[in-house]
Image (spheres, rainbow, N blue to C red):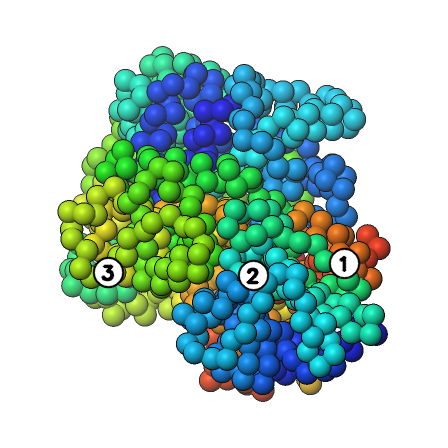
Amino acid sequence: MNAFVTLIIALGKTNSINAKQALLAEYFSSANDQDKLWTIALFTGKKPKRTLPAALLKKWCAAYCQIPEWLFNESYHTVGDLAETIALLLPAKGEEMTASSASLSDIIEQLSDLSSQSDEEKKAFILQQWQQLDRNACFVFNKLITGGFRIGISQSMIYNALAKAIQKSAGEIAYLFSGKWHPTAVSFKELLSKENAVNENSKPYPFYLAYPLENSLIDNDNPDDWIAEWKWDGIRGQCIKRNQQHFIWSRGEELITEQFPELHELLLQLPDGTVVDGEILCANPTSNTIEPLPFALLQKRITRKRLNTQILQEAPAIFVAYDLLEWNQEDIRQKPIIERQRILSELTNTIKSPHFKCSTPILFENWEQLRNIRNQSRENSTEGLMLKRKTSTYQSGRKKGDWWKWKVDPFTIDGVLIYAQKGHGRRSNLYTDYTFAVKDGDKLISFTKAYSGLTDAEFKEVDAFVKKNALEKFGPVRTVKPELVFEIAFEGISESKRHKAGIALRFPRMKRLRKDKSVEDINTLSDLKQLLLQHGKTYPL
Amino acid sequence: MSQELLTLTTNGLYCAAGDFYIDPWRSVHKAIITHAHSDHAKAGHGAYLCHHLTKPLLKVRLGDFAYESIEWNQPVTLNGVKVSLHPAGHVIGSSQVRVEYNGEIACVSGDYKTTDDGLSGLFEPVSCHTFITESTFALPVYQWELQEIQYRKVQDWILANQAQGFNSVLFAYSLGKAQRMATAVAPITNNIFLHGSAAAIHEALQKAGVSLPNIKKAGQQTEKGELKNTVIIAPASTMGTHWLKKFEPYRTAVCSGWMQVRGQAKRNPADTGFAISDHADWNGLLAAIKATNAQKVLATHGFTSVLSRYLNEIGIEAEELEYVN
Ligand SMILES: [Zn+2]
Ligand SMILES: [Zn+2]
């Protein structure tokens, strides 16, 4: 595991993309195949089987270090990462790196074997590793258990680095590694073999994703060069039909065919060698227009292991087609979208299923008109608009230039800061996690938390305010004098029994600090209830 | 009780019986100064008492005032209160202040570390009834590596930079850390440049008889060609300024205990960080506190609530001493 530890530590010490790529390439050129595979898996968010809950690790570490639980928690709060907290709490060792002969994949295998063992056996194994490994190795070992190597590496950086170590282009590698695979089920060689590429019918294409439009960008463009469509708020997916088999993949590269049985009928009707890109929504299929049900329903369906007739009736799914990527067994992503959509609309006419809809372009003459249309997004239950250049090819990943998402402006509400807690990771020494309240008569009632949206300088300022104005301490939480007013922006609102104010916000963040306002000026609970009535998705979250 | 021996006033920590202050933050008639860091030593007091090696530093930093200096373990009497200084190991000249009156003993630690850095003197535990301790790094995640290992890491980094044609910039406090870093790198280079503020302190200490490696001053007159394979020691405030330009190309490192935690290290814009501190780590603090046998511990300066809660739980009565600046 030493090479992997060295890699992780070195990656954490540089911000340069080139340097990171060079480190990765060097690692790939010497690591064995199984380690390469696991490394790619870990860096692309594929986790080893979780065999140990965080609570057990905490308990064992606190007991081993002879510190009380609250002190462990204070430490965790300052450090912001469980794996690192444990590595730092364990008694410091000498400098000699324990030359652990076990490879990365050996260690992962040993960890996964723990699942069949008793807690005592698990504890013995973990403690033995903790005593043996030096601080850096300990950190990496713990990370393998807790999951989530966030080290600022994109998929394309990994594929570029791997391309340097093996005889394949980065594009080819990206294709072979897309879709569903797991190191426990496939070997590095199998994944990279040509036959695999041909036989693997199910593979989706890498999704083309859009950046938010910066407002000025299109003003000088000719509206005639652009297609506008509604941006639906569902699950982006690809429907694939190859060799008489069909698959639905989500953008998160998960196979979700079985979660949507009502779409199988349309999949059967797709001609062989077809890949359609689109959005899965919950909506009434018999309606001619698209009227999505609350997003929460879709979420509920996705997380259900088993679907019953009740939920299938309550939340029927439809597929809204955006684009055609493969046609007659041919990859047509390099054709202009205007041509791809033409073929798509012909295809649409041949499909006899109420669950299949085609996204229709919005007609507009000038940008001003489109701006007005965008303002109706909320009434249409969409997130805003998509703009696509008529000549655009279907690219891979998030790219600027040809496709833009033009979301509707967020909701905003003014609230006052009432609780603060220290942040995690790089903000672990500052109070950056806040809870806000609105007025309810002459009382204050908390309605949301928010963690993001301020600049570093503003966070520092608020941090100083919290330290000066803390009224009470509850563990890591500080109650502060209700004085600082913030404008909170959010994307949606729904009823929630779990929250004090009875509402839950979607993507809340701080839009700005309103120094011009005092606690007298903030919004009220009835303002929120009004928003809920007008725009709320009444399905409980 | 000892709490009356020392009280916290708006000017700072005050000894009413002896009518003097310790590290006061507002101008007072008589101040005992633990060490020359700016959060402890302010200008404008009527009279100062400090260690022999702190005096030249105060002169450099604050200008001319009525300084009186004494040696460690040589008590003086102020209005019937017995006062003595004891090594704190924090920076050169840093001292704990022991105060005794009517059989009651209190000790103010100032800032301290318990390991011997070879420059600042070895921390001496002082038996007392009340111990006022700092708590900058009072969390068990702060456990320092041995100085020998820390220094070797810095040296390895410099040598790697040299091999790739880069100068090495170490960001360090001018007083304390800068002298330690000069000592740390002296075995591998004699090409050490100090920023003006650190150089002034370096020279004042050399003049006072402290043995320190020879350094070069990084003034305007430095020639360009001269600046190859150098180590530059400068305060963090020079990061990204024009002053550093003449040393390009260079790589930078921050030397601070805060670098121990990844998240904090990442926040700093330097290329790397070394967790080297002039403050005691968690184990150092606990060992120092236990060695005083104090009946009461007052925690200031850092993770005060954590330290006092933990001490109470292990049977040592403790409280937070809240400074209001
Ligand atoms: Zn200090
Ligand atoms: Zn200090």
Q: Amino acid at mark 1?
A: Ser
Give the vertical position of A469 relative to A394 (above or below). Answer: below
* Residue B77 drawn at (x, y percent): 69, 75
| Residue at numbered disc 3 | B219
Please name whichever residue, A444 or A81, is drawn nearer the observer in this view of the structure: A81
Q: Is mark 2 within 8 Å of ligand 1?
A: yes
Question: What crowding class fits label 2: few (fewer than 14 Cα within 10 Å), some (14-19), or many (20 or more)?
Answer: many
Residue B181: image location, x then y, percent? 42, 48
Q: Alpha-carbon neighbours of circle 1 within 10 Å: few (<14), some, or many (≥20)?
A: some
| Chain under disc 1 | B
Q: Secondary structure at mark 3?
A: loop
Q: Is residue B294 left or right of residue B20?
A: right
Give the SS element for disc 1.
Answer: loop
* Residue that label 2 marks: B94
Q: Is residue A255 left or right of residue B134?
A: left
* Label 3, residues with CA under 10 Å away: few <14, some 14-19, many ≥20: few
- Do the residues bearing badges 1 and 3 touch, measured as CB atoms within 8 Å? no
Identity of the residue drawn at 51% across and 37% down: B148
User: What chain does mark 3 sit on?
Assistant: B
Q: Where is mark 1, residue-wise?
A: B127
Label 2 to label 1, Cα distance in Å? 18 Å
Q: Is residue A230 left or right of residue A315?
A: left
Q: Is residue B126 visible?
A: yes
Q: Quadrant of residue A61?
A: top right
Find residue A343 and report its horizontal and vertical position in percent: 26, 37
Q: CA distance from mark 1 to mark 3?
A: 47 Å
Residue B303 higher or lower than A21, as above or below? below
Closer to us: mark 2 or mark 3?
2
Q: Indicate the secondary structure of the residue bearing disc 2.
A: loop
Whether discs 1 and 3 lie on one chain: the answer is yes
